Amino acid sequence: MHDTPTTAGQTALGEGTGRQEPLSGGLKQRHLTMLGLGGVIGAGLFVGSGAGIAVAGPGIVLSYLIAGALATLIMRMLGEMSAAMPASGAFSVHAERALGRWAGFSVGWLYWFLLVVVLAVEATGAAQIAHGWAPAVPQWGWVLIFMVVFTAANLAAVKNFGEFEFWFAALKVTAIVLFLVLSLLAVFGVLPGTEPVGTANLTGHGGFLPHGWAGVVSGVLAVVFAFGGLEVVTIAAAESDDPARAVGRAVRSAVWRILFFYVGSMLVIVALLPWSSMRPGHSPYVAVLDGIGVPGAGQIMNIVVFVALLSALNANLYGSSRMVFSLAERGEAPRALLKVSGGGVPRRAVLASVAFGFVSVLLNLKWPDSVFLYMLNSVGAVLLFVWGLIAVSQLRLRPRIEREAPGKLTLRMWAFPYLTWVALLAMAGVVVLMLTDDTARPQLLWSAGATGAVLLVAGVRELRARRTRR
């Protein structure tokens, strides 16, 4: 097991870098590399990007650059800490070592809650698509099938999770690459029936920034949460044969390619189609493929979105089980969850996570606009709290690692500490934007309430622990 610090000052930076977890080591480098690439390519990009284009126009390219740069900085910070201190709890363990037990407890439980609630959205979305293909099976039946299949896969062996994610990510990456190739051929008029489009759509219809910089800022708010999911690769790295090397390579290979996929996609979309034709809730990818004459574009994209949702469901089930297992290791969750199978799988942690996931799905199917909506709002902005603690933890741990075990800094955060502070300021800016946005404000306030409740519990536990030590 990893070390269990009781205060922020107690670390194990000087000990070996090998895997210390009692979990399986079945994940290979190819699994982690594709997880790093595909982890943030989801339905938010394929469908949700339409809402960003609607508010920012062609300036959505800048919105994605800004949001992507923030996500890249977070991933680099995570990579630095995870390469130096691999653990199944990843940033929860880092927060505990940097700030104390309250921080590890808070970020761990909030992230677990975030994953098991969002899991319901993904399962329901995939079931809606599958029900459209096979109406004879009710929507709840598809949800049950997906949950059972991925629970079984995660209970069997970690390599099953890795293989599912490898092929899911490979399909998503292939889909985006093909989309970019076809779109670029259309931009230059190479495809049959197309002519060079020039810059008419980029500079016409109100210009590149039809709503000014305010539109770009609103676009950032619309797309920044689509980058959530990058954290799972650092959790998974603890179950590879060489965690320090594996996470370093995965992070290095992912960050620039993610920016390329996101920003490149947006650039060709707004170059090929007038931004004013985009409608929130409708995939701009389908609109482009229809425009350049790809037959069955809508059905093709339905398949890609379906795979993206199942990929996210699988990753969230894996990430939530490992996070709650790590919390149990450190005495922050029931010790009964520490039971590990002969193959190194924390089966009770998997079952506990999927059980709450089933509850979330039932609430989503029964009360999507009331009970479940409140739950979803309560985790909507939690990602900002998680990212914020990642940055603060890196600020605290980097000097300590340099002092106690500099050899472990195989992957370094760029321009430390300046870019870490830039990331923190950017996240503070997103919070301010959410407070001023009528749509996002309720989500932020509900999430702040959930975060405050967990922090309160963490504070009470800390006080009790101090009294016990006396």
Image: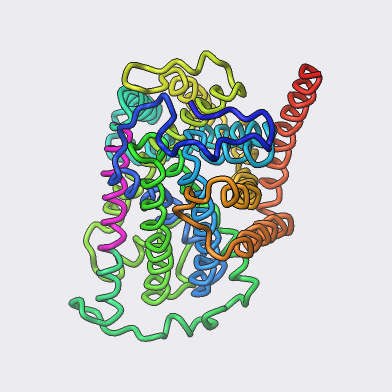
Residue interval drawn in magenta = 160-178
* Residue at position x 41%, y 72% in the image: 267
On screen, residue 390 versus residue 314, left or right, reads right
Q: Nearer the viewer, residue 174 or 233?
A: 233
- Way the structure is coloured: rainbow
Q: How many marks?
A: 0
Q: Nearer the viewer, residue 446 or 5?
A: 5
* Image quadrant containing the C terminus: top right
- Secondary structure mostly seen in magenta is helix
Q: Nearer the viewer, residue 224 or 232?
A: 232
Q: Is residue 338 above or below residue 139?
A: above
Q: Quadrant of residue 461?
A: top right
* Residue at position x 51%, y 31% in the image: 323
Answer yes or no: is residue 459 visible: yes
On screen, residue 41 versus residue 112, left or right, reads left
* Residue at position x 45%, y 24% in the image: 354
On screen, residue 338 versus residue 187, left or right, reads right
Q: Position of residue 42 (x, y in %)?
A: 41, 50
Q: Is residue 40 magenta?
A: no
* Residue at position x 73%, y 55% in the image: 435
Q: Quadrant of residue 237?
A: top left
Q: Is residue 88 above or below residue 247?
A: above
Q: Position of residue 117 (x, y in %)?
A: 54, 34
Q: Is residue 173 magenta?
A: yes
Answer yes or no: is residue 223 visible: no
Q: Position of residue 272 (x, y in %)?
A: 36, 75
On screen, residue 329 versus residue 448, left or right, reads left
Q: Position of residue 413 (x, y in %)?
A: 53, 58
